[in-house]
Image (cartoon, helix red, strand yellow):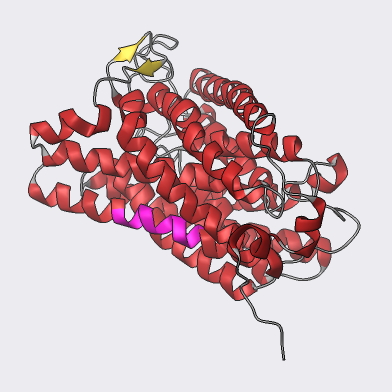
């Protein structure tokens, strides 16, 4: 990289880092008033332990010399010793950029466990999950592993495309969120009493910060201030705007009202869906990906009540569903303007669609099994869930000794 591209990646890494505090506002606003601090602390806690895990060994597992295409050599850059010894600014900021992705990915999972997970258990989970789940999947896709071009599973013509993290980030986090929600069980009163967002302005602010930071997430993944970054920026804006409309239209038809929560959730659904496809499709494809992401996620968030799993803040309905849709949609609408191959509806065959489906399926299976093992290990050692008394009275005071709002005198 020249100095201009290094400057762009420094800026992009800072934007992505901002997404985690933005997520704290988004999730904090969606939670109940008695657990808002705990919800926000989960994002800040993920930032702390995720960064430490990355520096220690997770970066090495993600980008180190491949061991059988499954993970990088954990000793290759322990404590970033090799990166710093090289004095290579390009390598250092690439490492930092990777850390911000790991941090936001594990922070996303916290939305599925709101109101009922011990903070100590969360911190242990986040640290271990970054090392054992996020980093190997990152290696598969971006580190030359089994899901990369030339990684062993796919031929040179048809291989999965994931520009900025449909599989690595959103499908991975969505599956982990579902597993943890099932392990923890439902909140007291789930499905019987309203558990509404306590601060919708927080939610809107969080969505705005996420959208702003996402330009670093997607356009920054070009690793240069070039044509690919420009294409990613335009497609990110296009899909996100279309997703807002798709979600609001679904709400209007179904409920008769278009809500602010729906608009904010539509923002996130569109951002999630376009992440893997940011340069793989043309703007018309981004429009289709966005509008259907809004529709699919708006319909999916209600499934938890029908199926009985308590995904508190809709990690599954938004990140897993929109992440799956955006990943598979490349196989339908992919173009070679900036992408690697054409999709089913753009002149290509079934090869690309199959590659996308396989990549999504492999990620789902590994994330589910590995997350389950980590969750069970914590459950039967230090415990996962707070007591019923703490859950009812408010997790903020019990876990942090603070409350967000003083009672009116």
In the visual, does 12 lie left or right of 270? left
Q: Residue at x 49, y 37 (%)?
A: 166
The x and y percentages for residue 316 are: 67, 43
- Displayed quadrant of residue 375: top right
Choose between 83 and 293: the one closer to the eye: 83
- Displayed quadrant of residue 246: bottom right
- Helix, strand or loop for the magenta stretch, by majority: helix
Furthest toward the bottom, the residue is: 409
Residue 171 sits above or below residue 67 on the image:
below
Choose between 175 and 34: the one closer to the eye: 34
Highlighted magenta segment, given as a residue range: 14-23
Quadrant occupied by the N terminus: top left
Residue 207 sits above or below residue 361 on the image:
below
Q: Residue at x 22, y 52 (%)?
A: 10
Residue 302 sits above or below residue 157 on the image:
below
The x and y percentages for residue 21 are: 45, 60
The x and y percentages for residue 77 are: 24, 26
Residue 378: tell me if it is visible: yes
Quadrant occupied by the C terminus: bottom right
Residue 215 sits above or below residue 404 on the image:
above
């Amino acid at each position: 990289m020249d100095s201009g591209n290094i400057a762009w990646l420094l800026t992009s890494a800072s934007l992505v880092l901002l997404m985690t505090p933005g997520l704290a506002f988004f999730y904090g606003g969606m939670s109940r008033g008695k657990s808002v601090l705990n919800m926000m602390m989960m994002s800040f806690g993920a930032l702390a332990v995720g960064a430490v895990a990355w520096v220690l060994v997770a970066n090495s597992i993600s980008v180190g010399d491949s061991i059988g295409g499954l993970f990088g050599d954990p000793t290759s850059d322990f404590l970033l010793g090799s990166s710093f010894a090289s004095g290579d600014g390009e390598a250092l900021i690439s490492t930092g950029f990777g850390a911000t992705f790991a941090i936001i990915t594990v922070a996303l999972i916290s939305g599925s466990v709101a109101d009922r997970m011990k903070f100590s258990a969360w911190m242990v989970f986040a640290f271990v999950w970054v090392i054992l789940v996020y980093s190997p999947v990152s290696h598969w896709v971006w580190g030359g592993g089994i899901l990369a071009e030339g990684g062993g599973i796919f031929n040179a013509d048809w291989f999965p495309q994931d520009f900025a993290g449909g599989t690595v980030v959103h499908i991975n986090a969505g599956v982990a969120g579902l597993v943890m929600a099932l392990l923890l069980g439902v909140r007291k009163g789930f499905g019987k009493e309203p558990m509404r967002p306590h601060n919708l302005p927080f939610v809107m602010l969080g969505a705005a910060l996420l959208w702003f930071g996402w330009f670093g997430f997607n356009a920054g993944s070009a690793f240069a201030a070039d044509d690919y970054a420009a294409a990613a920026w335009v497609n990110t804006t296009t899909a996100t705007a279309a997703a807002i409309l798709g979600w609001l239209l679904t709400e209007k038809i179904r409920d008769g009202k278009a809500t602010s929560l729906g608009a904010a959730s539509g923002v996130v659904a569109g951002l999630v869906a376009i992440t893997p496809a940011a340069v793989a499709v043309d703007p018309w494809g981004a429009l289709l990906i966005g509008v259907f992401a809004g529709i699919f996620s708006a319909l999916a968030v209600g499934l938890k009540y029908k199926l009985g799993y308590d995904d508190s803040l809709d990690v599954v309905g938004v990140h897993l569903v929109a992440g799956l849709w955006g990943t598979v949609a490349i196989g339908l609408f992919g173009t070679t303007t900036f992408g690697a191959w054409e999709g089913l509806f753009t002149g290509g065959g079934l090869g690309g669609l199959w590659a996308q489906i396989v990549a999504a399926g492999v990620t789902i299976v590994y994330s589910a099994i590995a997350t389950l093992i980590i969750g069970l290990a914590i459950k039967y050692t230090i415990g996962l869930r707070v007591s019923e008394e703490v859950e009812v009275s408010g997790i903020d005071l019990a876990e942090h000794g603070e409350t967000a709002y003083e009672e009116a005198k």
